[in-house]
Image (cartoon, rainbow, N blue to C red):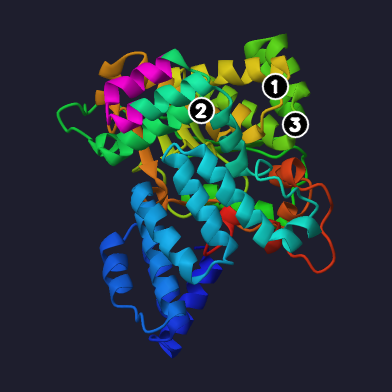
Amino acid sequence: MDSAAEISLSTAEQLAPDAPNVRLRRIKRAIAQGDFSFARLAIAALPDTGPREQGRRLALSGELAEATWDFEAAATAYRAAIAYQPRAAALHESLGRCVLLSADPRQARAHFAEARQLDRVAILLRGASLNPSQSRNGALLNDTWCDADALTATQQALSASNLELQLNTVNQFPGYTFASISLLITLRRSNRADQADSQLRTPAARRIPRLIHQYWDSRVIPDDVAELTRSWSEHNPAWIYRRFDRSEAQEYLRSNFGPSAARAFRRTRHAAQQADLFRLAVLLVEGGVYADADDRCLASLDAPTSSASLLLRQEHLGSIANNFIAAEPGNSIIAGAFELAVESIARGDSDSIWLSTGPGLMSRATAHYLACEPSRLQHLGNEVQIMTTWQMRPYLAHWCHASYKASSKNWLNQEFNTRPLAAGITPQHMLPLTLRPGS
């Protein structure tokens, strides 16, 4: 929830605290902030006097279960909600996502297809395809289908609830994103990602330097983006801040990694992919923090970066986000991800940016690092910290509103929307189903 939405909700709570919409927004806020106990009690207290109320209650139960990584329970709740609201596209999309993460791509595709049919008018107006594969969820779905042997091995490991089998599957199929995400979800569900063993922590000096890096492909940036980027210096006055443009980033790659890396940068197909490659390069050489230009800093980064050698955020899909990364120079996971990114671009891979150089890539690099030497699992929560979105929420707001997102500057529009913004369609409509507030 961004600051404007928070102010709106606070005002509504003062005027009509028991209004149905206010109660719903309060529950959604609690889920987004990781206050699951409050959300659970508040959902239980909701009225269920009619079909609409029952469907709403079940949908919120699904959101809560999904936020706590219980995708099977979330799928059950979403199915029950759909019985009351069969034409709710967002419910079908959410059900498809949970079914996919439970390793059933066939059923997931059916639900994604239904969601797109129900939302067909808005999808066609923005020039997108009704094909369920043409979305961010669809990109992961396509990858899940791409290797039958890898899918079977992942399904068997999940069915057996066997961590060793999952580690072996990641090693056997290092390019299979779904196996990596499944492993990362298992580690989260088993609390291994949160272990933070005090005996393994050392009072060593800070490993992540106080450097903040950002990228925008041109020297001149929109005013609303500039306002977001200023937040990083405002909250971290003792840190060194630098924003790179396209020519500076290309020269940086050439100087530090040679012509092959610079050539890969030139071959990127969107500014977002340029940022994907550059962030890995600058973190590998200098370390520090990289943050996307549409992220807003909310507090000092000193505390969360004080003891780790790598700080990552885990997305709701279980994948490792790359919008915010904090790392020491020369970090092994960053080095592996950079090598994979350069290779992918050099090959001319046609995968979605999310898979080839974005969170899909970061998920594979992180999972492979852990799987190739399982003793590294003890580093989770210590040297390698993977925080959830709600754990990161005090420090940054990601995916903030910006005017460029209604244009081809937004990589999602270039990959999945073929037309410019149509009359009457706002930037809100341009967001994929899974990113719409309240979905």
In the image, farthest residue toward the bottom: 15
Q: Nearer the viewer, mark 3 or mark 1?
A: 1
Quadrant in the rendering for residue 90: bottom right
149 shown above or below 213: above
Kind of residue at disc 1: Asp
Q: Residue at x 31, y 61 (%)?
A: 35
Q: Residue at x 55, y 54 (%)?
A: 93
Which residue has dot 1 on it?
Answer: 349
Residue 218 % position (x, y) = 77, 39
Kind of residue at disc 3: Arg
Which residue has dot 3 on it?
Answer: 246
In the image, farthest residue toward the left: 199
- The foreground one among 128 and 25 is 128
Residue 166, magenta (yes or no): yes
Q: Could you tell me if residue 317 is visible in this image?
A: no
Residue 316 % position (x, y) = 45, 47
Q: Could you tell me if residue 247 is visible in this image?
A: yes
- Magenta-highlighted residues: 157-171
77 shown above or below 257: below
267 shown above or below 45: above
What's the CA distance linking mark 1 and mark 2? 15 Å
Which secondary structure, mark 1? loop
Which residue has dot 2 on it?
Answer: 177
Residue 382 % position (x, y) = 27, 31
Quadrant in the rendering for residue 158: top left
- The foreground one among 276 and 93 is 93
